[in-house]
Amino acid sequence: MKPLIIGIAGGTGSGKTTVARKIAESLPDSSVPNASVAFLDMDGYYRNFAHLEMDERRKINWDHPEAFDFDLFVSHLEQLGRGEPVDKPVYDFSTHLRSPKTEHITSADVVVVDGILLFVDERVRALCDVKVFVDADPDIRLVRRIQRDMSDRDRPLEEILQQYLTTVRPMHQQFVEPSKRYADIILPRGGQNAVAIEMILTTIQRRLNARRA
């Protein structure tokens, strides 16, 4: 059976990864018996800028589509869609470099994918069977980004705010927000919206059962 690919997009700090993981964790306990789930995050697919010095890497616009290796990402999605495993790249956000390590992802009945620019690329949209856009207020997204970057990525507040104002916010307005029109489902309040997540799970369960019939 061809895997069902669920794409979950949204701005930085919107809660899309929380939604993606809640869906991935809930499916095996849902009404679909023995459903296996794989999780793929787009964050691992930043281009490798190892040829640049650290100061130059800090200046890269990480929120622009050109910062991502879409060709590799699409290739891996196609492989998972054929039921084949992939070795997903791992990105080190403290050094802005791709790690030599990879993460082995085995294909499954459902492949949950998340990323801020997931719906910007037409090829990715075509591979997603269900497209969800997670919406959240800008101030909430900014607070979450500050908390994440300071605790998980060891970045100073001044650098986080400068990056937000110079690239994150403009790229959200130029690329992320407009991609919302491609979504099948728009989910406000992120991972806190239990009712909407239940509705998404029901949609996935129905489609899975139809494929198994």
Image (cartoon, grey):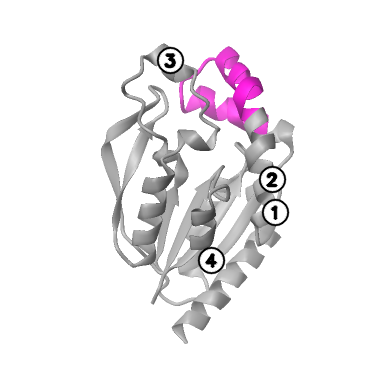
Residue in the image at 52% along x and 82% along y:
210
For the residue carrying disc 2, how many other residues have a C-alpha within 10 Å: few (<14), some (14-19), or many (20+)?
Answer: few
In the picture of the structure, the residue carrying the numbered disc 4 is 129
Does residue 60 lie above or below 31 as drawn?
above
Q: Nearer the viewer, residue 57 or 111?
A: 57
- Mark 3 and mark 2 lie on one chain; the one further toward the N terminus is 3
Q: Nearer the viewer, mark 4 or mark 1?
A: 1
> Does the CB distance between marks 1 and 2 fall below 8 Å?
yes
Query: Magenta part of the protein: which range?
Result: 141-169
Does residue 63 lie above or below 182 as drawn?
above
Three-letter amino acid code of the residue under disc 1:
Arg
**Residue placed farthest to the bottom in the image?**
213
**Helix, strand or loop under label 3:** helix
- Mark 3 and mark 4 lie on one chain; the one further toward the N terminus is 3
From this viewpoint, is residue 175 visible?
yes
**Helix, strand or loop under label 2:** helix
In the picture of the structure, the residue carrying the numbered disc 1 is 181
Residue 131: quarter of image = bottom right
Q: CA distance from mark 1 to mark 2?
A: 6 Å
Q: Residue 31 in the image: state x and y as whole percent.
A: 52, 76
Three-letter amino acid code of the residue under disc 3:
Glu
User: Does the magenta run of residues contain 143?
Assistant: yes
**Helix, strand or loop under label 4:** loop
- Mark 3 and mark 1 lie on one chain; the one further toward the N terminus is 3
For the residue carrying disc 4, how many other residues have a C-alpha within 10 Å: few (<14), some (14-19), or many (20+)?
Answer: some
User: Does the magenta run of residues contain 86?
Assistant: no
> Does the CB distance between marks 3 and 1 fall below 8 Å?
no
In the picture of the structure, the residue carrying the numbered disc 2 is 178
